Every structure is written in C-alpha cells, then in structure tokens.
Amino acid sequence: MTAIAVTIAGSDSGGGAGIQADLKTFSALGVYGASVITALTAQNTLGVTAIHEAPADFVRAEIDAVFSDLEVGAVKIGMLASPALIATVADGLIAYEQTAVVLDPVMVATSGDSLLKGEAVTTLRERLFPLAALITPNLPEASKLLERTVEASRESMLVAARELLSLGPKAVLIKGGHGTGATSEDLFFDARGPRWLSAPRHETQNTHGTGCTLSSAIAAGLAKGLDLDRAVEEAKAYVTAAIVAADRLKVGEGHGPVHHFHRWW
C-alpha cells in the first residue's frame, strides 16, 4: 500500500508554509500527498498582503473528489478562516470516517498577520476538536483558544494542555518554540498524562512554516502506520533538523522557510 496523507489548508504563494510546506514534508518523509485548498494567500517571507477564501461548496467538492478515490491514511488540517469552512471540513471528515486527524489551529502567520476570523475560534473548538486525534497549537494559539495567556513555563503549559484536552481532542501538543532558553520544550498530553519533548534551540530567522511542517510530519507518520507517540517524536526530530539546515537556503528577505529537503539537497 502507498502511504497517503491529505492536507486541508491554505496556499502560501511564497512556498514556505501552508499547502506547499505540507506537500514538501509529505514527500520528504516518503508519503504521497494530496490536498484540499481552503484559501489562497498572497504571501512571501515578509508578510501576507491578501487572502482569498475558497467557497465552502467548492471545498466540499475537493473533499469529495479526494476522499472518494484515494485510500487516505491521515489528514492534516491547517488554515480554515471562517465558521462555514470549519463546518464544511468537519462534515467531510465525518462523512469519510477520518480519525487520524492532526489539527494545526492556524491563527497567525509567522509575520504576525491574522489568518483566522475571530468568530471562527468557537466553531473550531466545537466542531473540529472532537474529531482530532491531535491538536498542535503554539503558545499564542493556545492563548487564543483558551482566551487567556498561556506562558512559556511548564506549569502554565500543563494547565493549558489539560484544558485543551477537555475540549475533545484525543491528544494535545503545545509547541514551545515561542519560549526562550537553550532548549525548545514541547508538551505532548493525552489521557495517560504529560510527556515533554526537548530539542536544542537554534537561532535563525528562517522559521517560516515550522508549525505547518510539524503537523504535516506527524500526519505523514500516522499515514505510514506509526502510533501517535512515535509519529510526534519523529516529526519533532525532522523539524528540528529542518530548522538547523534552514540557513543553507537563501529565500526572500524576511522570515525564510525551513529546509524541508535537508536530507536530500
């Protein structure tokens, strides 16, 4: 069987995040990637200049086309800008009985540009969280989801993870990349309790697409048959290496991408 993963997300015209980062990640990790595009963004390493949301009925047509034909092993969900799109994706996941779902609650681009309408946060929590095997918020996203500040401390992250888990996902991965210190601390939390994943912090401005890359790497692992713990562990190692290698690329004048193909070129 060919391992197949699907990304349901927005397009990044600069190629560093979104659908483009997801498909690069799938390919780098030996997984066939398909896509459902939810939005077009005019974007580069300096920022987002325009967003064009795909109509909900067209997104459903994409879902039907992909899932009715391909034997999908895992789904990564990224940018969903509106309640209508979130509801459409939720209905599609239920219709095609998808359970290996990694939800990256994309709200703000690396550049600081907002990618999610305020009223969509409630719909995201209510409709998609209960369908997710894993959600992967960073610290600012966890703060928005819980409507309070989640600090870059183990105590604050543990409390937040418990609260997020109570909203319905099977597991939570709070990313600590926005913290400080010599290591980047991520918290994996499920019904069995917490597990910390640490990696040396590498100083670079080329971190565009790290969240997209991590969630799609986890989905790739699930598509290949790994259990969630192993998929998260391998994805963390892959992203860390992609960040370390990022400065080998020269792409744009702002926040450049990580090096998805660091193992190959």
Image (cartoon, helix red, strand yellow):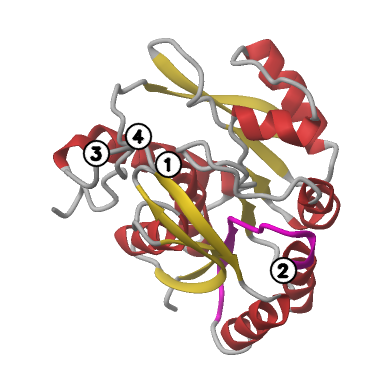
Return the x and y of residue 219 as percentages of the image width and height: 52, 56
Q: Magenta span has 81?
A: yes
Residue plotted at (50% across, 50% down) = 218
CB within 8 Å, label 4 to label 3: no
C-alpha gap between disc 2 and disc 1: 23 Å
Residue position for label 1: 210
User: Camera-side residue: 96 or 61?
Assistant: 61
The amino acid beneath tag 2 is Val
Q: Is residue 191 visible?
A: no
Q: Nearer the viewer, mark 1 or mark 4?
A: 1
Magenta residues?
Answer: 71-84
Helix, strand or loop at label 1? It is: helix
In the rendered structure, the answer to whether residue 105 lies left or right of residue 217 reads: right
Helix, strand or loop at label 4? It is: helix
The amino acid beneath tag 3 is Ala
Picture quadrant of residue 54: bottom right
Return the x and y of residue 30 as percentages of the image width and height: 34, 64
First of labels 4, 2 by sequence position: 2
The amino acid beneath tag 4 is Thr
Residue position for label 4: 240
C-alpha gap between disc 4 and disc 3: 10 Å
Q: Nearer the viewer, mark 4 or mark 3?
A: 3
Residue position for label 3: 246
C-alpha gap between disc 2 and disc 3: 32 Å
C-alpha gap between disc 4 and disc 2: 30 Å
